[in-house]
Image (cartoon, helix red, strand yellow):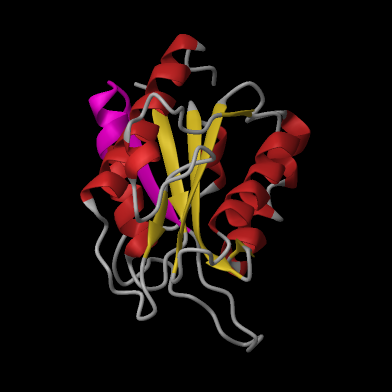
Amino acid sequence: MSHILILYYSRYGATSEMARQIARGVEGGGLEARLRTVAPVSANHEATAPPVPEEGAPYVTEEDVRDCAGLALGSPTRFGNMAAPMKYFIDSTSSLWLSGALRDKPGAVFTSTSSMHGGQESTLLSMMLPLMHHGMLITGLPYSEPDLMSTREGGTPYGPSHLAGTDSDLPLSEAEQRLCQALGRRLATLATALGGRK
């Protein structure tokens, strides 16, 4: 069975919860959801991450990315852009780009911010750029999802978003959960329609 890779970085847990909700949507759409994370980066050049995270999803491998039928990329916002660990990982995918491993596969993005206007849309757009360079077919959320018109928390047509609050401790609202699940179903549907190209 083809899998949809849900690759994220999360520091306080909101982005990882979004990833789990997207996984629910993927599995509801009939495909396997594979949750993976990226290692943190450090200014201390001697620091090394353990080979397996202490908690949460395993670290992503090149095979996870190469063999996926679709990809959802998630990161909290850092000054209107993706977090450094996600960018660091993406910068290491040149061999996948050279081989065209992600070409013609559906790709999507999701994010979480502390404030409503903390750069949700610019972060989503910044994560789309490398996916486009990889030749992925970018999908967002259509306005046929009624929560996009009524949410007072996160949610954009560019992809799901979450308002975590100034202490980064607000749980996902029901609307935010539904939008994450809708993106997962959409990725599964598109990957199936595209033949789950490997």
Residue 2 visible in image: no
Could you say where residue 28 lies in the image, as x and y percent from the top left? 23, 27
Q: Residue at x 33, y 42 (%)?
A: 150
Depth order, front residue of 24/117: 117
Write down the quadrant of residue 169 in the picture: bottom left
| Position of the N terminus by quadrant | top left
Magenta stretch holds residue 35: yes
Q: Is residue 120 above or below residue 104?
A: below
Q: Which residues are magenta?
A: 24-37
Magenta stretch holds residue 17: no
| Position of the C terminus by quadrant | top right
Judged left or right of residue 148, residue 106 is right
Could you say where residue 138 lies in the image, as x and y percent from the top left? 60, 30
Could you say where residue 54 lies in the image, as x and y percent from the top left? 31, 72
Residue 26 visible in image: yes
Q: Is residue 158 above or below residue 20?
A: above
Write down the quadrant of residue 13 in the picture: bottom left
Write down the quadrant of residue 107 in the picture: top right
Could you say where residue 5 lies in the image, as x and y percent from the top left? 44, 39
Judged left or right of residue 27, residue 183 is right
Q: Residue at x 75, y 37 (%)?
A: 133
Judged left or right of residue 59, residue 96 is right
